[in-house]
Each structure stands twice: as structure tokens, then as C-alpha cells.
Amino acid sequence: MGTRRGNNEGCIYKDKQGHWRGVVSLPSADGKYKKKCVYGRTRKEAADKMNEILSKLRTNTYIEPSKITLYEWLCQWLDEYCNDIRLTTKINYETFIYQHIKDSIGGYKLCDLSPMIIQQFYNDKLKNGKINGKGGLSPKTLRNLHNFLHKALNQAVFLDLIVKNPTEATVLPKRQKVEMRYFTVDEQKKLQEAIKGNRLEMAILLCLYTGIRQGELLGLTWQNVHLDMQGQSYINIVQTLNRIQNKDKNASTRTLLMLNEPKTKNSFRMIPLLPDIAKKLYEHRTQQAEYLEKNGYPQTDFVIASTVGTPIDPRCFQRDFKIILDKNGIRQVNVHGLRHTFATRALESGMSVKTLSKILGHASVGFTLDTYAHVTEQLKVSEISGMQGFL
């Protein structure tokens, strides 16, 4: 048996099975000490493991390995540290945990996770990660999964459950540049002509002349609309309407419509209205109220409502918008393309990128520049040609 030493010195000896055992005394929360054992096939192997612990104890960097699994930690983290996030974000996190992590790397103990394990998990998800089994996750979805995991494991580091965050050393796929689809000036004019008298006319005009997101549009209520025919009219964005997963397993529907807070703090914003748009919105409110009263339906708080005064389902809005384009021979651009059309026209009209960024509710001017780089590049060419006259 090895010579016994004081606390934080450790001892090494051979046990009855012939294995080398190193024992270190660790301080506990109650001021007492508890024994920590390490094992090795040789005395040197046990000594190296023991000395590594002793070294970390002396520099106050030792963390007792946690026995909690990744899945258990993520469930605990979601329950205790995610109480102030948007409901839609929480549902996304639950999907990551239960659909992607639980049955793959969820069984690993936190202390056993490594960058290689996480990287292999990411690589597998890129190839075969879709829940329906038809292909892999998109780079954007994988990045969202990574950001979620990185955030949860950072909290584990703060709580001394692990020493380092294993996601730090992983490599993510390059961001895919999504084709920016928007209407040309001629297409926009044709669309505006086609929607005259259509029940979605006001909705489409608001998208084209405010850059409002679909969820923000469908969640807009009259109390957040300020109409001043003699001054400045505007709308306030304070909520969104989205279709989300129904957590009630006994419910007859798998999803439900719900009002949520906007995506980020920058999404809370005021958007000025052009005088003509304000006038049309005033007329829309009057016609909406008259129609509902005439047909015996209760008055609605929603600016864009169904024929019975209820909120419009985002899927129905997308479907009906597509029908309008089909019937009028207009190139197919999705609803989000209306927002891109607004941004493109705004830049073409001379609006500063900083102002546009505020109106769109972007996180930064840099993001706006990157998103609409195709427009700014075209403007560079046309504007620099104006210097020709100085030659």
C-alpha cells in the first residue's frame, strides 16, 4: 500500500483485484471531504489521473463530472431557464430535444460529450435529419439547432456541470444564399390593379407599402392603427399571429392559431403610412364594420379579418394570394416576397439603409445591407454614372 498523504495530496495503492487505485480527498459544500477514486492498469496511469485532478484542485479549476445526461439537462434547462422566451421559440426547442436529440446523442452524459460527438451528430442531421425521413436538415435549420444546443451547454458551463462547451469546436455548413424573390415595378403595378375590390386588397397593399411580415399583418389590431388624415398616420407592431403546434394531446386539432410577441425587440416598431394608404385603411375600417353589422357578425379587433370577423389563418392567406397571382398571370412570388418588394422599392426610391432597417425591424443595418446587397449593387452602378458629367 502507498504512503498516505494529507488532503489534496492523494495516495495510490493496489486493490484486491490487482488494479491500481488513486484516491484524492475533495472538499464538499458542508466543509468536509469526500473521496474521489481513479483507476489505472499501471501505477503511472493511476498517478497521472490523480495528479491531473490535484493540479486542477490547486488552480481551482476542478469540476466534478456530472452524471446527468444531455437529454436530462436539456429538459431541465428548458423548464428552469427558458421561461421568458416566445412560445414559438419554446416549441422549436422542444422539437430539437424530443425529435432530434433524445434518441441520438441524448443518452450521453454531459461530461462525456466531445466536439467529435457533436460534429458527427451535425453531419448526420445534414444527411438524414428531417423528421419525415426524407432527406437532411437545411443549413439554416442546423444552425438553429446548433445555437440552441450551444446556449443550453453554455448554461451548463456556468453552473460548473462541464468545463467547456463541446459545441465551440464544431464546424457548421456555410450559409446558403437564398434567392431573393420580389416583384418588378411592372409586376407590382399589375398586381395592384388585379386586387382592386378583392377582400385581400388592403392586406396586400399594407405588405407592399410597409414591409410588414405576414404574422405581424394578420395580428395587427385597430387599437395599434393611428389614422390622422391631416397629419402623420402610422401603425404599431406589437404582436404576431402564428399557427403553432397544439401541446394538448387530447385536442382534435394538431395546431392552433395564437398571438405572440414579435420575433425580437427590434420587431417592436412604428411604421409610418403614406397618405393614400392611410386613406384606404380608413375606408377599409368603415367598410369592414358595415359588412359585419349587416351580416350579423360581431365587430372584430383585427384589421385583416375573415368574412365572419375572425383572424385569417396564415395558410389560407398564402393560398388565396397564390390564387390571385395564378388568375392574373403574375409570376409566382410568395407572401414574404411582398416584404422584399417593399424593401427593393424603398432603396430604389432613395431611402437610406438605416431607415429601411428600422422600418423592417431588422437587428442591424449590416443585416439589411447583406439581405438586399443585390439592390445596393445595382444602385452603385446607376449612381456612379452620374459622375460622368464632371469629366
Image (cartoon, rainbow, N blue to C red):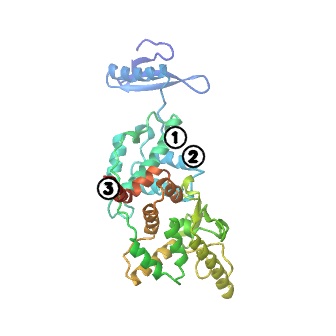
CA–CA distance in space, label 1 to label 3: 58 Å
Which residue bears the numbered disc 1?
Answer: 155
Q: Which residue is mark 2?
A: 81
Between 40 and 150, the one lying in front of the other is: 150
What amino acid does circle 1 point to? Gln
In which quadrant will I find the N terminus?
Answer: top left
Amino acid type assigned to the residue bearing label 2 in the image: Tyr
Q: Is residue 56 left or right of residue 312?
A: left
- Position above or below: 248 against 65: below
Q: Position of residue 283 (x, y in %)?
A: 62, 79
Element type where label 3 sits in the image: helix
Q: Residue at x 39, y 62 (%)?
A: 131
Sequence-first tag of 3 and 2: 2
Q: Earlier in the sequence, mark 1 or mark 3?
A: 1
x and y percent of residue 24 in the render? 47, 21
Percent x, y for residue 288? 63, 80
Instruction: Give the label on residue 388, or none.
Output: 3
- The answer to which image quadrant residue 137 occupies is bottom left
Secondary structure category for the residue under label 2:
helix
Task: Locate residue 10 relative to residue 127 in the image: left or right.
Answer: right
